[in-house]
Amino acid sequence: MMKNKLATKIFMYLAIFSLFILIFLFFFQVIFIDTFYEWTKTRTIKNLSKDILVTENDTSLYDKLDKVSYKENVCIELTNSNGDNLYSSYGNNCRLRSRTIKRNFINSNKESKTYNLVNNFTKEKSIMSATKLSNNLYIFISTSLIPLDSTINIIEQQLIVVSIVVLLLSIVVAYFISKRLSLPITKISKAAKLISKGKLKTKFETTSDIKELVDLTNALNDMKDELSKTEELQKDLMANVSHDLKTPLTMIKAYAELILDININDKEKCKNNLNTIIEEVNRLNTLVNDILALTKVENDLDKLDISSFDLIKLIEKIVKQHNIYVIKDGFSIEFIHNNIKELVIDADKKKIEQVIYNLLNNALNYTGEDKKVIIKVVEDDKDYTIMVIDSGKGIDKKELDHIFDRYYRSKKNHKRYVYGTGLGLSIVKNILLLHNYEYGVTSKKNKGTTFYFKIKKDS
C-alpha cells in the first residue's frame, strides 16, 4: 500500500473539499436555478393567497390589494361565483389571464389550485394560484416567470472566475495548514526514531497550540522517562544477576579446588567445604527458581490454584521456619493477630506462602539494630490487612514507587542476614496482582518500613 505524507493528505483533503463546494454551487446556481426560481415563485403566490383576507364589505380592500400587487410584483384578480371581475390589480408581470381556467376552477368547487401557464404567442410562462375565499368570492394571483438565460450566462461566467480564485486560495491555504499541522508531528516522529535507536535523552518538543498534539508530546515524554528507568533497571538487573551468579560460582570453584588440593585427607574440613558448596548451589538454585517464578507470573504463564486455608496457621508455620534466625542471630519475630484466631481465605496457598516468606526475609534483611520484625493482621469493616514491619532506617519517598521493581534495592545501608535474590518484592507484587489484592508500602525515616496487602472480606 502506497504511503503518503501527512502534509500531502491534508492538502489533498482540503483541495477536494474546495472542489466539492464549487461543484455544489455550480449545480444549484446554474443547473437547478430555473427549478428553484419556479419553486420560489409558486411558494410566494401560494402564501399570498393564504395571507390576503378578503370580505365583500371591506372598504379598504382595493388599497390593500394594490399594495400587495406592486410590492410582490404580481397580478391579483377578485371575481364572484359567476366569473365577473370585481377588482383587478396589475403589477409589472401581469400579462396573462385565462378566463377558461378561472371558470373551470369556480365550477370545480375546489378550495385552491396552482396552474402553470404558457402564452402560445410569446411563449412566456406564468404561474397562477386560485383560491376560494367564500361561496361568492374567488381570488386569482398570477406572476410571470421571467426567462433566466441571460442571468444564468452571467452567473456561469462569474462562477468560473470565482472557481479559479477559490481553487488558488484553497491551494495556498491547504499548503500552509498542512505544513502547520504536519511540522510538529514530523518533529515528534524524528524524535521517536532517535529514541528507537537507543538515544533516550532525546526530548519530545512541540510549538503547536493544538491540545491533542500537546497531550501526545507530554505522553511520549512520560513514556521516554519510563523507558529510561526501565533501561537503568535492566542494567542493574544484569549487573546484579551477574554478581549473584558469579559469587556462588566462585565460591564453589574455590572450595572444590581446596578439597582437591588440600583437604582430601582431612574429612572434617572436606565435609565443611562440601557443605559450603551445597549452600552456594542452593543459593544458585533459589536465584534460578525466583527468575523462573517471576517470568511465569509476569507473562501469565502461572495459573492460580485456588483453595481454602487458614492464613493465621500458614503465617505461624512460616514464623516457626524462621526460628533458626532467632536462635542463631538473635532476631525477634513477633506475630500479632489480636482476637483473630482463624482467617480462612480462598487463594493460592503456595503463592501466598511465598508472599509472606519473601516479605519476612526482606524485613530480616533491612531491620534495625534491635533485629525486631513484626507480622501483624488487623481487620476493619471491609478488609483484613496483613502487615510486615521492620525497624530499619526507612525508605526515601523517591524510592517508594520503585521498591517493587525487579532487582531494585534501596540505597540505605543494611547487613544481609538472610540470602536473597533481589527478586522477592517483584514476585510479591505480581502474585498480589494475580489475586487482585491491594498492596503497598509505607516508611518513615529512622523508624522503619511496613509492607502490607489487603484481603477483602467478601473475597
Image: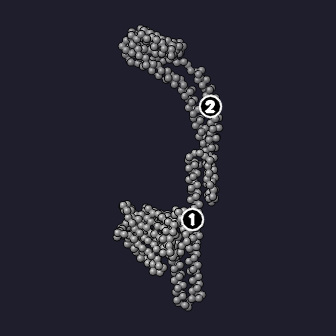
Secondary structure found at label 2:
helix
- Amino acid on which the number 2 mark rests in the picture: Ser
- Residue contact between numbered discs 1 and 2, judged by CB atoms under 8 Å: no
Q: Residues within 10 Å of mark 2 (few under 14, many from 20)?
A: some
User: Any mark on residue 381, and which?
Assistant: none
User: Any mark on residue 163, and which?
Assistant: 2
Is residue 32 something that shows in the picture? Answer: yes
Q: Nearer the viewer, residue 299 or 335?
A: 335
Measured from the top left, where is residue 202 in percent x and y? 63, 56
Q: Residue at x 61, y 49 (%)?
A: 206
Q: Residues within 10 Å of mark 1 (few under 14, many from 20)?
A: some
Q: Earlier in the sequence, mark 1 or mark 2?
A: 2
Q: Nearer the viewer, residue 270 or 20?
A: 270
Measured from the top left, where is residue 190 in percent x and y? 63, 52
- Amino acid on which the number 1 mark rests in the picture: Leu
Q: Residue at x 37, y 66 (%)?
A: 345
Q: Residue at x 59, y 45 (%)?
A: 209
Residue 53's place in the image compared with 394, above or below, is above
* Disc 1 target residue: 233
Q: Residue at x 59, y 20 (%)?
A: 150
